[in-house]
Amino acid sequence: MREKENPVKKFVGHHVGITANLLRTAFAARITRENDNISPEQFAVLVRLSISDGLSQSAVAEYVLKDDATITRILDSLEKKKLAVRKRDPRDRRSNLAYLTPKGREFAEKMLLEVKEFNRSLLEGIDSEKVTVVFEVLEKLRENAANVIKKQPKGYLD
């Protein structure tokens, strides 16, 4: 008996999802193994703070697409590792600002070099024009997905 073709294999979300899962698994294995058990989420926060230090937790959450409670846990973990610190916002005592420690800045710079090498290995055998097209297509997919979400009724995703 011959098996039917899986119609899901023709959906872009299927391919993007599988690829994202594989990339996340490979990335997590690489950075966790070599870097004091840093998770991909912790890495994303380190990178964000290395670009612009002294951000509110909500600004960090927006960048890494996580909720405030998750960012609190991530920052707790980074503080325990002495990679980040939170300080009261002098303009709003109800809010904290997140900063990298000197150790955290050095660590983030080291990790970025490793991630650049990881990225190079992923792009092996793919010419730069195709990489540019992939980035353009992925950006358009993100834009379209965001528009689909915006069109949903209020409370649909809560």
Image: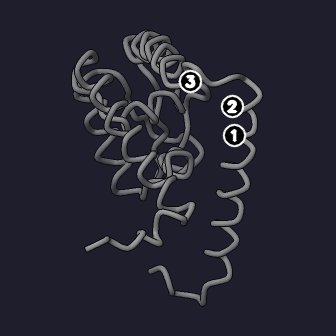
The percent position of residue 107, horizontal first and vertical second, equals: 39, 13
For marks 3 and 1 on the same chain, the one whose residue lies earlier in the sequence: 3
Q: Are marks 2 and 3 in contact (CB under 8 Å)?
A: yes
**Residue 135 shows which numbered tag?**
1
Q: Earlier in the sequence, mark 2 or mark 3?
A: 3
Where is residue 136? Give x, y as percent.
75, 44
Residue, far bottom: 153
CA distance for labels 3 and 1 = 12 Å
Q: Which mark is residue 131?
A: 2
Residue indicated by mark 3: 123
Q: Residues within 10 Å of mark 3 (few under 14, many from 20)?
A: few
Amino acid type at circle 3 is Leu
Quadrant of the rendered image containing residue 3:
bottom left
Name the image quarter holding the N terminus: bottom left
Task: Report the side of 97 relative to 152 (left or right).
Answer: left
Number of the front mark, 3 or 1: 3
**CA separation in Å, label 2 and label 3:** 8 Å
Disc nearest the viewer among 1 and 2: 2
